[in-house]
Amino acid sequence: MREGRNVARHAIPPERLRWQPDGNDIPGDSTRDIPVLDGTLGQDAALEALHYGIASPGHNQHVFLRGPRGSGRRRLLDSLFGSLRPKARQNRDFCFVHNFSNPDRPRLIILPRGEGRPFQKQMHRIALFVRERLPDILANDPIRGRREARREAAERDIRLLLRPLEKKLEAEGLALIRSQAGPNARLQVSVRIMGKPVSQEEFRNMVARKQATEEDRKKFEERIKSYDEEINKISRQIRKKWQQAQQHIEQIDITETARIMGEMTAEVSQRFKADGIEVYLREVIDDVLEKRIGHETSQLADPTVLYGVNVLNMGREDSGAPAISTSSISPASLFGTVDPAWRSGGRAVASFQGIRSGTLIQADGGFLILDAEDLASEPGVFRQLLRILRAGEVSIAAPTADWSQAAQSLRPEAVPIDVGVILVGDAAAYAQLESISREFSRRFRLLADLEASVERDGDGIDRTCRFVSAVVQREALLPLTRPGLAAVVEISARLSDQPGRLTTRVGRLAEVIREAAFLAAGDDETEIGREHVEAAFGRIRHRAGLPAAGRIQHSVDSGLIRLRGRSAGQLNVISRERLADEMFGAPARLSLTAARGAGNGISLESGEGELPVRQFLLPMLTELLHLDALPDLRVAMTLDPAVLPDDAASTLLGQACGLIAVLAGLSVRQELAVIGSIDARGQVGRVDYLNERIEGYFDACNRVGLNGQQGVIIPAVDKDRLALDKRVIKACTNDQFHIMAAASIAEALERLTGKTAGIWKDDGFPEDSVLGMARASLQA
């Protein structure tokens, strides 16, 4: 009981265990009375850098917005873009068309903003005309009449050519037979009998029927054969005349087609002014004239595909700069790709129509916003992005694996871009990108750093309440009462994890507000009160902390963590762990042994490995005990359960106290846990996540039952950071649990051992003091 009274005597009063704002600091009785916050909490320096980067982009400078998730990074960007409304630096439509002279190198045509789709429609109209109307026009009466007239003229010329031969044959009793008209006509000489032509085959039949003699047959065949040379000559002349006629007929179609196509493309040429359009339109006309007039077209590409236009992006209808945000980090999504068209039989065919733009092209003239954490996980994509920003153009290509050779062989012309890239990420992502390429810091020279907290003054409280009002209005939530707002401000102070500060992690606050609104609605309330805010915060932490609670229970039940009695060479510290973006405290046992041996040495093990040891511990001990030199001493320490290396510093006060207690031969109270760091001079320093550590130890004690002697020793410099849960405060109010501050190692030792630490006086410590007993053991 005496130890319990000593603990209570040193405990921090319950009213100082949770900071609360003055009621007058809350700027209204309800969020209905409070104007919304434009932007996010604080962040003046970040706002200045972002304002410059957005309002005055260019010069190949890009922005990195650095801050933890939940700090309002995207809200800040959205607010700035909404207020600045930057104008687009470029307003261009990028169009790809077929390159008739080099099909593997599609031609890029760049049009002014809004012209891409009309250009596409015009070319589609021309392509439909070629496919569906041109054949009918060439077959209509006027053009068909001109072709027929040319054929009739050719036929007249041939009849004139044949007339002399026909007269000559008639005089010899022969006749000239034409098997058919046109260029494929065949000439044949036959016998004329009774005014009618008889073929040689029919004459042979007549001989067989005794209607003519064999001698007559031979005589006629010899006479017919004598005309072979002349017949062949005339046949060649006929074919030549028909070839000339056919060329004239085709020229009629070509001339008419060229005239029509020229008129149609002239409209396009006059409306759309851009490099490459004149050449492209000429190539379209030439392709139609060379391949689709007088030729079979069933095996040719559909005109609507071949003469079509692939518009990669289309500028905004207004003059505002695009601000494209994407969560997909891949070469195809950022830089574009080429999709092959699949034909029957699994055959892939690539064309300009399969070219797809990435978000970098879609953001031309404006901004591309990327998640830096995601980008850091794709080093190859990041290096490619830097190369593109350096060159100012994007070369679209198909992926190198699992794609057809046809798609990979297509090499579209490079697309010029003018884009400001804004990377959004935390400090770890910034460091990772910096390690990937030294060029990173040169390209992203504008660093907008978000502060983790703001001053806990009137302005900070006012802005926090205005942020709450903005969330309520934007998401149509129930309004918060003045006590509800005060509870949010208290949670903000806790989340800042710093004295006299409020958090800027607005995402965490918004999460609490949403759940509080859900709870209030479930209670049929019209406003959100303090009880709803506190319950929401507790529910969020409870859900996230279930795995940690199970592990703590196991540690207590197994006896690994002792929460009652005294023990030599063991004391309790409190580690931390993050679960679902929430931090939790967990008790850990620090075990120590010290033995005289050869040389000085100290080790610290945790789990299956060693943790870094602060080498100043033994020199600091020498100074603290006023020794000229420390005798040979070997110290071994272990931490169970395992503590993360970056959290080992929070156990330094415990390490120092435990070592001195071991040297003094004293047991340590197991109801207490100690947290705190120390420096090389033995000064007690802060620890992070103070409240979470205390609550974690409280929960462990509560599981075995509170006995009024349990508590936590914290650094005195951390007293102003206390923002404990009300159940902890209630236990402290009822003297069931205690929070004690220690400004020095000596004060912590007194709380842990129950003995006076001792003051150096007259060249010594009191013999029965902790420090005196430790010094004596080393001098023995």
Image (cartoon, helix red, strand yellow):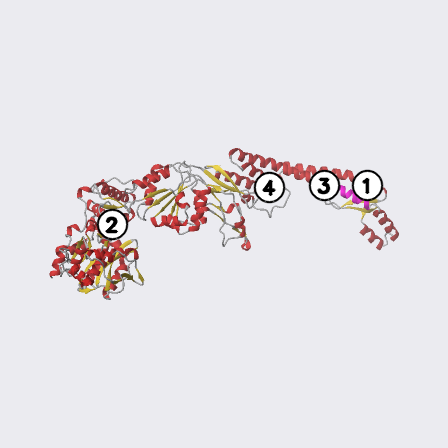
Q: Secondary structure at mark 3?
A: helix
The residue that disc 3 covers is: 242
Which stretch did the figure color magenta?
228-243
Residue 457 on the magenta span: no
The local crowd at label 4, few if under 14, some if 14 to 19, many if 20 or more residues have their Cα within 10 Å, is some
The local crowd at label 2, few if under 14, some if 14 to 19, many if 20 or more residues have their Cα within 10 Å, is many
29 versus 8 height, above or below:
above
Front residue of this view, candidates 625 and 585: 625
Q: Is the C-beta separation of discs 3 and 1 under 8 Å? A: no
| Residue sticking out furthest to the top | 270
The numbered mark, 3 or 1, whose residue comes first in the sequence reads 1
Q: Calculate the distance from the C-alpha at mark 1 to the C-alpha at mark 2.
A: 117 Å
Q: Position of residue 705 (x, y in %)?
A: 18, 62
The residue mark sitting in front, 1 or 2, is: 2
- Residue 43 visible: yes
The residue mark sitting in front, 3 or 2, is: 2
Checking the image for residue 165, the label placed there is 1
Q: Calculate the distance from the C-alpha at mark 1 to the C-alpha at mark 4.
A: 45 Å
At 80% from the left and 39% from the top, the residue drawn is 163
Q: Position of residue 126 (x, y in %)?
A: 55, 39
Checking the image for residue 287, the label placed there is 4
Q: Calculate the distance from the C-alpha at mark 3 to the C-alpha at mark 1.
A: 19 Å
Residue 550 occupies quadrant: bottom left
Q: Is the C-beta separation of discs 4 and 3 under 8 Å? A: no
743 versus 137 height, above or below:
below
The numbered mark, 4 or 3, whose residue comes first in the sequence reads 3
